[in-house]
Image (cartoon, grey):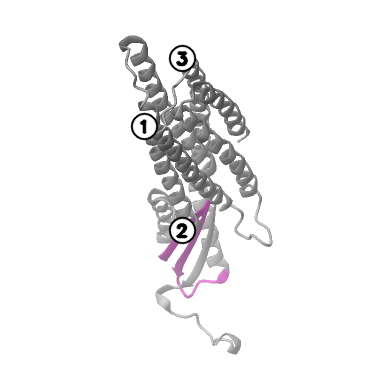
Amino acid sequence: MWLSVATAVVTLTIKGVAALITQSAGLMSDALESTVNLVAAVVALWALNLAAKPADDGHEFGHGKAEYFSSAVEGALIFMAAGGIIAGAVLKLLNPVPLEELGFGLLLSTGASVLNLMTGLILIRQGRKHRSIVLEADGKHLMTDVITSAGVLLAMALILGAERFLGQDWQVLDPLIAIAVGINILLTGSKLLRRSAVGLLDATLPAHEIEIVHGVMKEIVDSQHCRLTRLRTRESGRQRFIQATVEVPASWTVARAHQLTDALEEGIERALPGTEAHIHVEPLGGGSVAGPVPPQLA
């Protein structure tokens, strides 16, 4: 995550210089998004450190949801940046300012975009490897930055080319491309906010992971002539939680039922490492065990 912070600092500096030199709304929008990248990277670093903490007395299911909080903050920051970009571009459209030193500005912004591209690919790969929404979200944000930067650079190149080779003034493209960048950033922010909301609301595991869990449990349960009657799943950051109900013959001892739950939990852990499973046992068919029920439990 320190890589993301360092990249954000460097690219913000480069793009800021390019925007100031050229007086371009498009390049200024690019620099503003890099500011969001820096703040988001710092928040993500905090969230990763918090999410990595083990469960404690006050957080018995761990701190995994801190990752969703980070993603939500990043989404909100993106919305704010997009609003600033669009507002600035509209003002520039109404009150045009001549662009200067476009060639040098293009060179600086291209270098910053290449740096973002390399960092974004690394973060996405590591995020998928470690099931971290923070790393993946930050990587995707950087990739979005690369795409929007490419659009800005293309517009700047067209303006520069039109002036040098056609003798025409296409500078109106500058605020227009900045508005397009702002709209694209809004879409990215909405996706991040949606994913964060889904995680904070205890969404189930992805369908393919549920199929894996069900397959593992069904194989073990069927081999013991028992029955799986309920399966619930949820995820919290990179952590997975499974709750299931299994019916066993009423004649089974507690020790034998415990062996079955151990086998189920170990099987799930092998199939999906890092999963915490809780298996509840009931008598097969809803029957009851032999013997009277203690008065305090009646």
Q: Position of residue 260 (x, y in %)?
A: 51, 62
Distance Cα–Cα, label 1 vs label 3: 19 Å
Question: Along the line of sight, which residue is nearer the eye, 167 or 233?
Answer: 167
Above or below, 72 relative to 85:
below
- 229 magenta-colored: yes
Above or below, 125 relative to 275:
above
Identify the residue position indicated by label 1 in the image: 176
Disc 3 marks a residue whose amino acid type is: Gly
Disc 2 marks a residue whose amino acid type is: Thr
Label number found at residue 233: 2
Q: Residue at x 54, y 48 (%)?
A: 73
User: Secondary structure under badge 1?
Assistant: helix
Distance Cα–Cα, label 3 vs label 2: 55 Å
Distance Cα–Cα, label 1 vs label 2: 46 Å
Q: Position of residue 271 (x, y in %)?
A: 48, 47
Above or below, 229 relative to 150:
below
Q: Main secondary structure of the magenta part?
A: strand
Observer able to see residue 112: yes
Identify the residue position indicated by label 3 in the image: 103
Disc 1 marks a residue whose amino acid type is: Leu
Label 3 neighbourhood size at 10 Å, few (<14), some (14-19), many (20+)?
A: few
